[in-house]
Amino acid sequence: MEPIALLLAATLNAGTALAIAGLGLLINEKCGIVNLGAEGIMLIAAIAGFATVVHTDNDWVGFAAGMGAGALLALVFGWLVIWLNTNQYATGLALSMFGAGFSAFVGIRYVQEKLPAREQFAIPWLADIPLAGAALFKQHPMVYIAIALTFAMAWFLYRSRTGLVLRSIGESPESAHALGYRVRWIRLACVVAGGALCGLAGAYISVIYTPLWVEGMTAGKGWITLALTTFATWRPGRVLLGAYLFGGVTMLQFHLQGMGVQVASQLLTMLPYVATIVVLALISRNPTWIRVNMPASLGKPFYPGA
Amino acid sequence: MRLEARPQPSVAMSIASPVIAVAITVVLGTLLFALLGKDPVRGLMVFFYEPIRSGYALSELAVKATPLILCALGLAVCYRSNIWNIGAEGQLLLGAIAGGGVALLATTATGGWIVVAILAAGAVGGMAWAGITALLRDRFNANEILVSLMLVYVAEMFLSYLVYGPWKDPKGFNFPQTQMFPASTQVPLLVTGTRLHLGFLIALAAVAAVWIFMFRTMAGFQLLVGGLAPLAARYAGFSSRKALWTTLLLSGGVAGIAGALEAAGPLGQLTPHVSPGYGFTAIIVAFVGRLHPCGIVLAALLLSMFIIGGEFAQSRLGLPRSLTGVFQGLLLFSLLACDTLIHFRIIWARRLAWNR
Amino acid sequence: MPVEPSVISRLALRGIRKAYPAVVANDAVDLTVMPGEIHAVLGENGAGKSTLMKIIYGVVMPDAGEIRWNGNVVKVRSPHEARAMGIAMVFQHFSLFDTLTVAENVWLGLDRSLSLIEVSARIRAKAAEYGQDIDPLRPVHTLSVGGRQRVEIVRALLTDPRLLILDEPTSVLTPQAVEKLFVTLRQLAQTGCSILYISHKLDEIRALCHRCTVLRGGKLAGVVDPTVESTASLSRLMIGAEPHRIEHRTANQGPVALAVKTLSVARLDQFGVALDDINLHVHAGEVVGIAGVSGNGQQELLAILSGEDPRALPQAVQLFGSPIGNLGPRARRARGLYFVPEERLGRGAVPTLGLAHNMLLTRQDGGAVRAAGWIDLRRIREMADHVIARFNVKAGGHHAAARSLSGGNLQKFIVGREIDADPKVFIVAQPTWGVDVGAAAQIRNELLRLRDMGCALLIVSEELDELFEITDRLHVIAQGRLSPSMRTSKATTQQVGEWMSGLWSTEEPIHAA
């Protein structure tokens, strides 16, 4: 393939993990809860998915395992922040640290494992289009699932009544409680769904994207995803676009190295992190813009007392 | 079972909570060892007895506690001001880089003053790194959690760029490390035969200084109010921008000193592995220590035991060193759950009293 | 009273009790509401009215007692159940979602699965039935406070309630809008719907309600016919003592202390209000009031006056003739301008800090802070003790956390803290909002005493009665503009009400003071 087409293909591939996790965090944050544990969830889901595929040889079982692990961790996180009213930031950090430690701990046996090569998936005819065809239509099905998920999420949040309830809880849990909605259970459902999607993204990274297991392999993708929801001003479509943008930046460093650009690899590796910082600063520059788009109760505790 | 808000936060619970959390972590750890087929008693010994069993072990405990205390002090000031700096690790690395850079300039003939210069450079390095976060938050309203965290990755890459590249020891068999610093740069040792250095005393002095700053001066009071009730701080006329810069520069500064102490103390050179995650562990230290300078000393010693315990677990039980991370995460989880009882009490209600 | 062909009560409560850790909110409370009856629940702040309504609406479960609905014993476990039974509630706070549209807000309050389009149609129909104008597609944050209340009421009415609960509905309305609301409520009662009307405003209850249940300290104080009671007798029943009276003395005016000149400030965001050409002056020894429905620019103006919002031009705010528009709150305090905000917990005081440390928020004078910023703990404790004693604050000493005080005592502490600094200009927002009657009277007396000592006072309040009681001159703020002032002694509720809707003629020189 042409270099540009290669970059495009790699961008879609890299952006997919970010997009899936980003949609997960989106639903999480739309109901008012920030999960700084995304990195930890993705790491544990990555090893869960990878180990499952090693033992079952089935990618989809691996994805399910990743989702299950993510949902389970999110359940614990949700119980702590929603019922025990622990600080969301601190609890998320705890999850990230635990995830880094625990995944490294259980993953040590899988460091040398390799996954079998798999058949390439291609959309008939479209994949044969010259230049971009292979890049766009010869991807893993999960790439297309992520796109479909984006549309589904947009419909769910902005067209369905359940989505409206969810947004209203993110806006004002007190009002929703007064109207009789079971705020805590709905929030827990959002957190678990978000965790499951982060888990899916983690499993995708270790099973398809890399595919192998090394300690700390998500390399901050969970944190970048957290920045992504701000970047997208909490809109599903922009999450997808942002994911491809960050995916493109991540891939660009490898391509620059491949093209023999005379810059030390360590400096190129900085690129996605620096890009995240720059983008975050540019997007947040207008506080009014953020305030209007951000779920109003984001990060704030809610206890349905008297 | 349900929770009921206490009219006043419980002081007793806020002290008991870390103790209960450690107990829970020990129970979970015991279960984990049993699950792994290791003798739980040996496992616990490795974590809770080996690190304190001899004078030398105790000195190592203090060596590892030193950067934890320094970083956690700065973080405690940040968290009390509601500034979520989670990038102490990056600030520590920049302190190590800046301090290390000064140390590389020294020769064997340089006087002892170079240690002061190294520590000052470390402080400046850490402050500059934290200053980026402050600047982006102040000018661009960028979320400090994400920026400070991203900067950790950037700092790690920068350090590894230096030790793989321009600062690599030409006689180092191509290992990613700088040459050993000249002896004149060595932070003075407190006890010969150990690695315990002056940094431990510096950390204790910082504990006292931070305590006075937070609880006895108007500047500290303004930070506290800003964290407890931002609207009250605005009403009082306490500047939130000043609070942002003060806390971040202070925490960056102490983390930077911690980094410089590591470089010019126990390590004596720069490698990609200057810190085994001190900056992240310090977050737990700050919380377990109740964001209080005195509590932080105890918590730092405890978490230092965890780090050393992890090393022993690797060498003696053949378990991965990442066990430390597992325990750290479990400890913070348990602590946060127990902290709920500071503000709430449990009501064991089998039935709702609904009299007919 | 309109009568349905039955004598079974719509709602009957017997022996309701609800205790919280610090306080017994309801104790042995009985309440009976007949079909088609407009029934008032009267009580001062903290009498347990809100808790009782939350119990009826299923938000809170009672510890003991019985609820009968149309004669049958029921348990109301959630607002969903309450709505299914035919109970609707219009809340005082916390029930609309600002960024959502009117239709979306209403949709969220309906249990039936209608589409959003059907909901919009029903809103239009119901609003027309009651002669109101509501656009279902507007986002709620663009509505005035009164407009939001109409949305709440329509949302309630669309559930076809048999009992409608209104919690302090008129605190956000102009006198004219109150009249309109009463027409709607009477029309609704004619259809057989019962109405529970919670209020502490005696005149309104006498004008609207058929019967009145009075609560005092969480207990039943009596059930009366408000149309035959006098305002004074209702007041006695409510507070259990003779109401306080404030002797109105004429002011002894000095020179202009505080002046605001052609102040215009853009709004901060779409939820805010822009200030438009505000002119205002307060003499030493004078109390000037600013009336208005909340959300018309009061917060923005107060932030400019206190210095929390530094965007004003220096000359736009003047203290004894010198420009202070660009100074921060501390610099203004140093020059004698003190301010009490509307929110007590979290703004006027730090909830978790003790009273001694709360002194430090605004009082770094008097030796509290020494050289190099060293806090003199003994001194701030003394200062706190002094305020506690001087203003009769009921608190567990200077260590007591601000949040452990009752609303009235905390307000006495905050107002006392500022008065103790001998302000030359004193700005107070909602001086007695949510404060019990005794504390309110004490605070008003303290304010008048301060005036008599030559301080200039500016009072921003939504309680017209209060403004009529303590001010010498009145302005009205509406949509970010300030009316001319009028002598309070010559002002009428009618006129202030019209001005609250922004209807004053700018040419007409009402009064030059």
Image (tube, coloured by chain):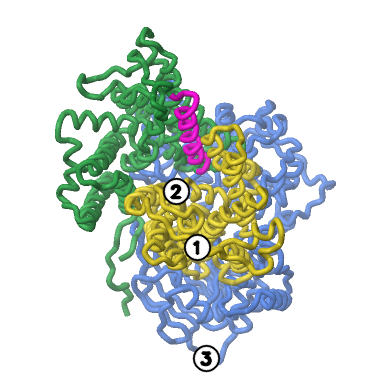
Chain colours: A yellow, B green, C blue
Name above or below for residue C238 compared with residue A249: below
* Viewer-nearest of discs 1 and 3: 1
Q: Nearer the viewer, residue B258 or C224?
A: B258
Q: Amino acid at mark 3?
A: Ser
At 43% across and 31% down in the image, what residue appears? B93
Q: Residue at x 61, y 48 (%)?
A: A248
Q: Are there few (<14), some (14-19), or many (20+) residues within 10 Å of tag 2?
A: many
Q: Is residue A211 left or right of residue C20?
A: right
Are the residues under marks 1 and 2 on the same chain? yes
* Cα–Cα span, label 1 and label 3: 78 Å
Determine which quarter of the picture holds residue A237. bottom right
x%, y% of residue B17? 28, 48
Q: Is residue B356 left or right of residue A81?
A: left
Q: Residues within 10 Å of mark 3 (few under 14, many from 20)?
A: few
For mark 1, name the chain: A
Q: Which residue is the site of mark 1?
A: A118
Q: Circle 3 is placed at which residue position?
A: C6
User: x and y percent of residue B164 in the render?
Assistant: 46, 30
Residue C392 image-quadrant placement: top left
Taking the image as drawn, is residue C307 in sight?
no
Is residue A233 part of the magenta span, yes or no? no
Using the image, name the chain to which the residue with label 3 belongs.
C
Residue type of the residue flagged with mark 1 = Arg
Marks 3 and 2 sit apart, C-alpha to C-alpha, by: 74 Å
Report if residue C116 is visible in the image: yes
Q: Which residues are magenta?
A: B146-168
In the rendered structure, does residue B163 fall within the stretch colored magenta? yes
Frontmost of labels 3 and 2 is 2
Q: Nearer the viewer, residue C505 or C114?
A: C114
- The kind of secondary structure element at disc 3 is loop
Q: Where is mark 2, residue-wise?
A: A217
